[in-house]
Amino acid sequence: MKYFLSVLLLVITVNLFGSGMGALYEKMRLTSTFDRYLNGEMPVQLTQSYAEIKYEYLGNGLVIIDMYNNDPRAGRNDRHYRYLSYNEYYNDNIISQNKINEFIQIMEITPTGPYLTDNTFNVIESYDENLSATSNINRYNITVESRYSRFQNGQNSTLIQLAILYFDNETKRLVDLQYSRINYPVIQYYIEESYDRVNLTTYNLVYEYDNIGRLENVYRIYNNEKYLIKKYFYDGTMRVFDRPYFNDIESPGLEEIIIYDNQTLKFHLKLFYAPHHYRTPETVEIRNNSYYYVIFEYDENKNEIRQTKYYSNDTIIINSDIISIDAFGNWIRMRVHTDRREPLSGLITTDWQANREITYR
């Protein structure tokens, strides 16, 4: 583990300082509040309503999203979440009519908790002007480092997140995202075993585009193999996941299907893990039975209007009735009502329903 950490830090050092005299480095800073079209964000399941969402634009497609939940019933640590995302629609280096207005989450950077002792966040862009246009080495990349240190219950812990975004030399599009998350607990100085309790998560994503520059496939590199985890279509035709979802226990599989009708987002299908606490499955059958998928549907303004959750023995439908929208077409108020549909009978049951109205901003 110590060897891997040394290699990881060496890789970051090489990317920041090892490109030669022609490399330029600049620390990116927040600019004015991000206030363009807000719709188009690829959503997740409706679990709670947020009273306010703020966007801050760093440039080159990087956006910080702050989500505030003013519900008095929310816990102290559930009232503010902060994410760093990438959205090619706001990358002015890309000259194309086929840019997708979709946020790709890079990392969570929420500085929460009363036990925080240190918090740093750095974004550095580098450009090597000496590399030729035909070089396979990316001339431009962005490196992000986030560190949190806490002291709680007599324990020091540090969370380090490292991400490197690589951009194609010609198209200027994101082609590779490398991310590592290191959770390093140091219990007390006399417990030597604590140094063996490093929790490390790392992945590498590769982005592939079609012949007119539309995002088509996203792969994850696992054990030096490419696995398709996200697939895009632009013909508006619905597809669904095929069971079984996975062919083995460990390797990644297709997790998301995104369907556009030209530039209009129509459907987003995503796999979710059903149990509340993740447990490593013992067999591939157990892994497949532990997952379900959700179909998200949208209106012409890319506002979500329906979720359909497909379990192995049940189906739940969540409808979102848009009551009012803003000048950009984003919903301001909506009414959410949930019904359960039994797959065999095809009837809506009336004894299990939930209704609520939520307001955005």
Image: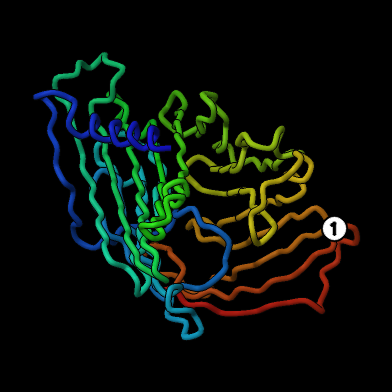
Closest to the observer: 66 or 159? 159
What type is the residue that disc 1 sits on? Pro
Secondary structure beneath label 1: loop
Q: From what the image shows, is residue 73 above or below residue 209?
A: below
- Residue plotted at (66% across, 74% down): 337
Q: Is residue 89 above or below residue 111?
A: above
The quadrant holding residue 60 is top left
Q: Which residue is mark 1?
A: 343
Task: Judge from the rendering whether residue 107 lies leftward or rightward of residue 315; answer left or right.
Answer: left
| Quadrant into which the N terminus falls | top left
Q: Position of residue 22 (x, y in %)?
A: 10, 24
Residue 236 higher or lower than 150, as above or below: above
Quadrant housing the C terminus: bottom left
Q: Position of residue 357 (x, y in %)?
A: 56, 79
Residue 69 or residue 101, whichever sits in front: 69
For the point 41% across and 43% down, the residue is 100
